[in-house]
Image: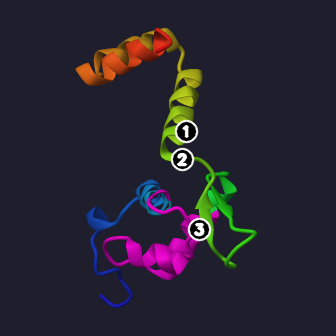
Amino acid sequence: MAGTDPRSRAERRSAGALESEVLASLWATDRPLTPAEIQSGIDGPLAYNTVHTILKRLYDKGLVLRDAEGRRGAYRPAKNAAELTAQAMLEALDRGPDPIGALQQFVTGLSPEEERALRDLLAGG
């Protein structure tokens, strides 16, 4: 059929998955990247316009910053991966009706190493 995407819907990545891939590309380097550099670093075929659209969405959400000092059109992450994950966890707790219950469920899913690290953090160590 003419004009259809050769990949099936199951093979297409969601916008959230694409955002994660773009952020991962930015976190993997210490310098701002252009959409073309991000495009070349992502596995699988992805149009330049798609990368640019994802970057605009991330910018609108405050997750990436445009590089005002360096190369025009380059982007860098607004937060590192740990900061973004912590923010998402706090927002999820705020949305739920039972944040203590959610924390209890979360803790039961931790690996022994993660549980030790959490205990150390709570103990101030």
Q: Which mark is residue 83?
A: 1
Image point (32%, 71%), residue name: 43
Q: Amino acid at mark 3?
A: Pro
Seen in the image, is 59 located left or right of residue 39?
Answer: right
Tag 3's secondary structure? loop
Q: Residue furthest front?
A: 125
Q: Quadrant of the N terminus?
A: bottom left
- Residue type (three-letter) at the residue carrying disc 1: Glu
Sequence order check, earlier mark of 3 and 1: 3
Which residue is identified by label 2? Answer: 80
Which of the numbered marks, if any, corresponds to residue 32? 3
Amino acid at the residue labelled 2: Asn
Stretch of the chain drawn in magenta = 27-56
Do the residues under discs 3 and 1 have CB atoms within 8 angstroms? Answer: no
Give the numbered dot on residue 110: none
**Alpha-carbon neighbours of circle 2 within 10 Å: few (<14), some, or many (≥20)?**
some
